[in-house]
Amino acid sequence: MIRPDVSTQRGRLVVVAFAVLATLAVALAPTPSGLSLAGKYAVATMVFAAVCWVTGALPLAVTALSIPVLLTAFGVYGDIDAALAPFADHLIFLFIAGFMLANALQKYDIDRRVALWLMATMGSSPRKLVAAVMIATAFFSMWVSNTATSAMMAPIAVGVLTQVIGRDDLKEQGDDGEFTNLQVSMLLGTAYAASVGGVGTLIGTPPNAIVAGQLEQLLNYEITFFDWLLIGLPIVVVTLPIVWFVLTYVLFPPEVDDVSDARARAEEFLREEGDLSRDGTVVAGIFATTALLWVVGGLGDFVQPYLSPVTYTTIFGGSGETLLGTTSGHQGLLYYVMVGLYAIPALVLFDTMEWEELEDIDWGTILLFGGGLSLASGFAETGATKWIAETVFNALTGAPIVLIVAVVVLLIIFLTEMTSNTATATIIVPVLISLGGVLAATLGLADYAAAIFLAVSGAVAASFAFALPVATPPNAIVFGSGYLEQKHMMRAGVVLNLVMTAVLTLLIYALFLFVWPTLLW
């Protein structure tokens, strides 16, 4: 893709001017049949946001902040309070808690220690060394942002590679003018594992939270932490080994046999870390407890027969009386957002983190969530998403379920290659939610169930764009390190995009048959 030059102020001004003109063109055009006037203005707002997000003319968060302003200016909302309300969505606070908890893990190098331990334990061969890096990266990407995970893991991978390859500067190519296969496969494996691992949990990557937030806002349907784990974890378990196999056996088979120096280096790094401090042990305990409670909070249906109604309502939520004497219902002490927020005062009370350390998180992503939810709300209230879904996807009516899933997955992967996975999910998820009403009969589901199925499928696919640096932050971080070339990422990415389209289609279809009925009925 040829991207506009937005590296200069003039370039940014030109692109933003184009975005404004395109927005006005849509706003002033005749209103299409079936679309309300307010819906047309919501589409015009999306055009502005999409151009800025795709080109990078403005930071993602800055573009997100323009959305409630434009929606209010166009009159989609009568006042800006309604347009700003989605910025206080509870899932935003779940991500704030997740980011702060990740800061604590990184402060005490807990993530680094686990990664080095895996490499020292598993790295008995070149391929197993790559596998160890990918497993560690994927695991932490489930709990820490994939951006932070890849930024942490890439230097570790480089440090170990220097011992295997025998060059202090990995940017120096070998005698044949090429980087070694082991170097390419390990660094690409780091990026791809961060993206794949992020699918595993609700807080693993922004598209997951975006689809959860928009489903609750548009359909009043809540995906719990445990619900997402039932979907995301099988996808990680199946796809991560496939990515590893394609990289190390098909595309870039390692040319070396002896990796003993690399294992020794990992062990040396681990010894240098020393014993985990008292504060580090406390942080690890808080993290483990939080993760455990996130899972337990989704097991309410299994334990309900063994608890009194009052106790169940207090712990897991419901509409009845609670142990505290209230009778108007309760969200439950183990509601996953509340569990995440419990961890923050715990970190402070045990004197492991200062507020200045906790607040240093990716606020831009937080604002992006709010802008995306504001846009989705505007689309829903004006009928714009339903109009787009019916206009674009009517041709799929009557198509087999597998074909519908394949089209959605391929479309999302293609769009994500041109822009970030977060921007893609923000733009396309509301359309997929409305698509549920169009294809419900074809899928044999109720409207809301079809919408949930398609939207979650799209969010998952947004993490599987592997060909270009712009597609995901992990791709950009690894490519920006200078230790591999774009042709390597393009070669691996094109192959894996095609492979993963087929794999995800079959896997999502299997989940549709065996897991979705548990979640949706």
Image: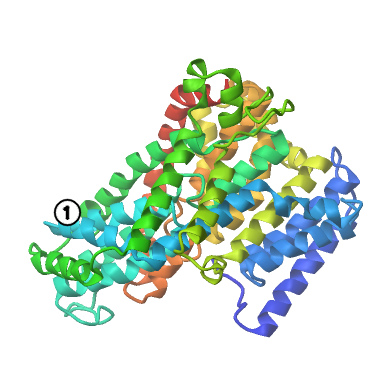
Near-viewer residue (282 or 338): 282
Q: Residue 247: which quarter of the image?
A: bottom left
Near-viewer residue (485 or 242): 242
Q: Is residue 493 visible?
A: no
Is residue 198 found left or right of 495 in the rendered image? Answer: right
Is residue 376 found left or right of 308 in the rendered image? Answer: right
Near-viewer residue (326 or 331): 326
Crowding at dot 1, Cα within 10 Å, few <14 / some 14-19 / many 20+, comes out as some
Position in image of residue 371 (x %, y %): 71, 57
Question: Which SS class for mark 1?
Answer: helix
Position in image of residue 103 (x %, y %): 46, 63
What colouring style does the render use? rainbow
Position in image of residue 241 (x %, y %): 28, 45
Q: Residue 129: which quarter of the image?
A: bottom left
Q: Residue at point 12% right, 57% down?
A: 125
Count of numbered marks: 1
Q: Which residue is mark 1?
A: 122
**Which image quarter is the C terminus in?**
top right
Residue 503 position (above or below residue 80): above
